[in-house]
Image: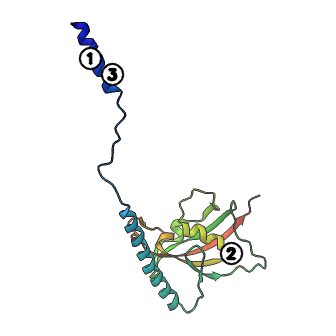
Amino acid sequence: MMRTFIAYCSLIFLVTSCQNPQVRTPTKTSSGSFIEASVARNKLIYKQEKATIETLIKTDSLRDYISSESGFWYTIIQKDSAASKQYPVVGDLITFTYNVKNLAGNVIVSVLENGIQTYKVDQSNQDLISGIRDGVKLLSPGEKATFIFPSYKAYGYYGIEKKLGTNQPITSDITLVSINKNQ
């Protein structure tokens, strides 16, 4: 009797363990609508910021602004007097100063708060916004420029805690002090 019971249990175990695995289907599927909505929202934000920035540029009749390939605008305030201009390239160690202002011109972070920055071009993990990392490459030593960055090139969704809200375009005055060329 015991042998029959063990044989019966073994047979049931063998039959049930030899089944093919069951495919588990997800209980909830996502259509990607969140990403599509996010893209649409960001396009609208950029369109509004661009219109605001272009209006600001038109009202500043004293300066000529240049539109960069990286998606921001700038004007050179103080030009380099040297005949042969040197621009920073990848690996150069540069020193510069910068501030952060809102579009109304109110200082959010001053040059004194930031201090003199030392940055290895495109090789440093320094906490610089992408606009400043791209902007310093357009200057030669001794030059100062005012940059207008849309929010995606500035502090974007995060802003600056207790100083700058989310999705706010900024201006920044950057002075390139020196370039130590990479050997």
**Label 1: which residue?**
9
In the rendered structure, find residue 14 and report the number of the disc placed on it.
3
Residue 139 in the image, given as x and y percentages of width and height:
66, 74
Q: Is residue 117 visible from the viewing direction of this image?
A: yes
Locate residue 9, reporting x and y percent: 26, 17
Expressed as whole percent of the image width and height from the top left, the position of residue 60 reads 53, 90
Residue appearing at x 62%, y 73% in the figure: 175
Classed neighbour count for the residue bearing mark 1: other residues with Cα under 10 Å, few (<14), some (14–19), many (≥20) = few
At a point 21% along the width and 7% down the height, the residue shown is 1
**Observer-nearest of 24 and 3:** 3
Q: Nearer the viewer, residue 113 or 24?
A: 24
Q: Earlier in the sequence, mark 2 or mark 1?
A: 1
Identify the amino acid type marked 1: Cys
Element at label 1: helix
Look at the numbered discs 2 and 1 and tell me whether their residues touch, using CB distance below 8 Å. no
Q: Earlier in the sequence, mark 3 or mark 1?
A: 1
- Quadrant containing the C terminus in the rendered view: bottom right
Q: Which residue is mark 2?
A: 142
